[in-house]
């Protein structure tokens, strides 16, 4: 699950915007529909995941979105680990 991959607990965490500092630190920047609002750093690999916004969705849909993110994170980690 995403918690295990992230290496910590996600309870109480809230999303925040991607900063230029974050993008400079990362080797791969994964965005989820932020478009032009996300900073672009030349030389970084960008991956955009088109996902449904969970805001206001029933818990079953939020869990499905969470599970989709979990699967994508696992696949990306496996790809980067090769």
Image (spheres, rainbow, N blue to C red):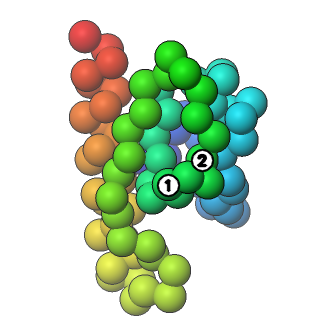
Residue 32 pos. (x, y %): 45, 55
Residue 21 position in % (x across, y down): 74, 30
Q: Position of residue 69 (x, y in %)?
A: 35, 53
Whether label 2 touches label 1, CB < 8 Å: yes
Name the residue rendered at 63%, 40% in the picture. Answer: 39
- Residue 68 visible, this orientation: yes
41, 27: nearer the viewer: 41
> 18 left or right of 45?
right
Pick the residue in front: 40 or 2.
Answer: 40
Horizontally, residue 14 falls left or right of residue 78, namely right
Look at 36% across and 71% down and name the residue there.
Answer: 52
Residue 11 tag number = none
Q: Which residue is mark 1?
A: 35
Q: Which mark is residue 38?
A: 2
Q: Secondary structure at mark 2?
A: loop
Residue found 27% across the figure and 24% down from its top: 78
Residue 27 visible (yes or no): no
Quadrant position of the C terminus in the picture? top left
Q: Is residue 2 above or below residue 52?
A: above
Please state which of residues 68 and 18 is positioned toward the viewer in this rendering: 18
Q: Is disc 1 surrounded by few (<14), some (14 to 19) or many (20+) residues within 10 Å?
A: few
Q: Position of residue 34 (x, y in %)?
A: 52, 57
Q: Residue furthest top?
A: 82
């Amino acid at each position: 699950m995403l918690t295990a991959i992230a290496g910590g607990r996600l309870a109480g965490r809230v999303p925040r915007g991607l900063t230029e500092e974050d993008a400079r630190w990362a080797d791969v920047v994964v965005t989820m529909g932020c478009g032009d609002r996300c900073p672009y750093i030349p030389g970084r690999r960008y991956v955009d995941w088109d996902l449904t916004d969970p805001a206001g969705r029933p818990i079953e849909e939020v869990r499905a979105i969470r599970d989709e993110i979990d699967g994508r994170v696992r696949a990306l980690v496996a790809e980067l680990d090769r």
